[in-house]
Amino acid sequence: MLGTKSIREEFAAIVGGANLRGGAAEDAVCGVVPQLVLEPEHEGQVAKALACANSAGLSVIPRGGGTKLDWGNPPRSADLIFSTARLNRVLEHASADLTVTVEAGCTLQSLETALARHGQRLAFDGLWPERATVGGVLSTNDSGALRLRFGSLRDLILGVTLALPDGTLASSGGKVVKNVAGYDLPKLATGALGTLGIITRAVFRLHPLPWGAKTLSFGAPTAERMQRHILEIQDSKLAHTALQIHCATGSEPRADLLVEGTDAGLSAQESELRKILAATPVQATSHLAWNAREQLASFLPESAAFLKISFLPAVWTDLVRLLRATETAEKLNWRGIFQAIGIGWLRFEGGHRELLGAIDQLRSELERRGGSVVVLRRPPGLSSLDAWGNPGDALPLMRAMKLRLDAKSTLNPGRFVGGI
């Protein structure tokens, strides 16, 4: 048992007494306070301590920067937190090969700064980059508007090392851009919410920094008109990097488009956009427009829920109609950021009963159309609301993989799809 002196001494012997402390209120995961917090200094300590926890029947919650620790369902138990704060180095930047190997506890901002010195970037825009870590964004599969041009994290990751509950350090993938050999552990670990293993390092493909960038914004009086504009842009020769739509209770939709390149290229792209949109005014705006998703997710009051949704881009206008109807029927306020690829983030604010009704209705409608609703954050009084919705026919395979890699359900028990 965790309360015995011997098990604490065993953890202290592995990670060092200075890297072991009791859990506190600020360490709580969805209201569950862990008994101990471990901060290993290298991946060997992570694997050895995880094996010790697994043998003792203790549950483990991996933690990076803690920015998304409340995403997913509440854990069934949370005996230990394994923090990757000390695993924070950029291990190898092969600039000529456009790859980087980085430890899981390195923040996105630190990685971005290191890569920028060589004119390169990880073409990815996660939430709260000054605190969010590589391991955390991989585990949650968080990605922003750059996904339109560069793909998701599953497209950018080349290799990964996982500490498994049996004490194994399992590596898959490599440090080359084309890599097809072996089991695809990197993609499997991405988005698994730390339920299969603790990510200790990752290898990514990189892209050059652009010569310049410009954000262009435009509005539309109705969702139908905005949908036509988006389809015209997507069907054009514009080489835009990102495209997002803002929509909210009582306001007209507005869109931002990001173009990158040389000064001449940016001017040509802007001229082409103005030609496509004809009489619709286009304005050059600040790059801060791309912080809209972070603003949506930050400082949530207790009356708010934060959702990630997926939908067919062609039904976006139907989605907005549903949200407009919901705000009237359920007396809710909502704000949304939608990407042209069919991913969006919604912030609902209202009473608990109204939130439940709106989320159930939205989830039912989107799942019927092949989409999904994931409740990333919810009010404290709605902790029983399932975060994930219908997992479909993939659940048996997911459970089989969980059983293979984490038979005792040591890692993040109950937090993932289907109670995994």
Image (tube, helix red, strand yellow):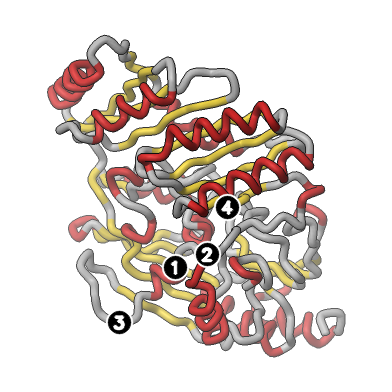
Q: Quadrant of the N terminus?
A: bottom right
Q: Which mark is residue 201?
A: 1
Give the spatial CA distance, label 4 vs label 3.
31 Å
Give the amino acid at mark 4. Answer: Val
**Within 10 angstroms of label 4, few (less than 14), some, or many (20 or more) residues?**
many
For the question of whether residue 44 can be seen, the reply is: no
For the question of whether residue 399 can be seen, the reply is: yes
Give the spatial CA distance, label 4 vs label 2.
30 Å
**Within 10 angstroms of label 3, few (less than 14), some, or many (20 or more) residues?**
few
Please name the residue shown 25% across and 18% down the image: 277
**Residue 331, image quadrant:** top right
Q: Which mark is residue 374?
A: 4
Q: Nearer the viewer, mark 2 or mark 3?
A: 3
**Within 10 angstroms of label 2, few (less than 14), some, or many (20 or more) residues?**
many
Which comes sooner in the sequence, label 3 or label 1? 3
Which comes sooner in the sequence, label 4 or label 2? 2
Is 194 situated above or below 14?
A: above
* Horizontal arrangement in the rendering, residue 291 relative to residue 27 (left or right): left
> Where does the image place residue 311, in percent across and percent down from the top left?
44, 46
Give the spatial CA distance, label 2 vs label 3.
26 Å
**Residue 154, image quadrant:** bottom left
Task: Verify CB contact (< 8 Å) between mark 2 and mark 1.
Answer: yes
Is residue 77 or residue 51 the one in the foreground? 77
Is residue 149 or residue 226 the one in the foreground? 226
Is 64 situated above or below 335?
A: below
Which comes sooner in the sequence, label 2 or label 1? 2
Q: Nearer the viewer, mark 3 or mark 1?
A: 3
Give the amino acid at mark 1. Answer: Arg
Residue under pointer 2: 87
Please name the residue shown 36% across and 22% down the image: 225
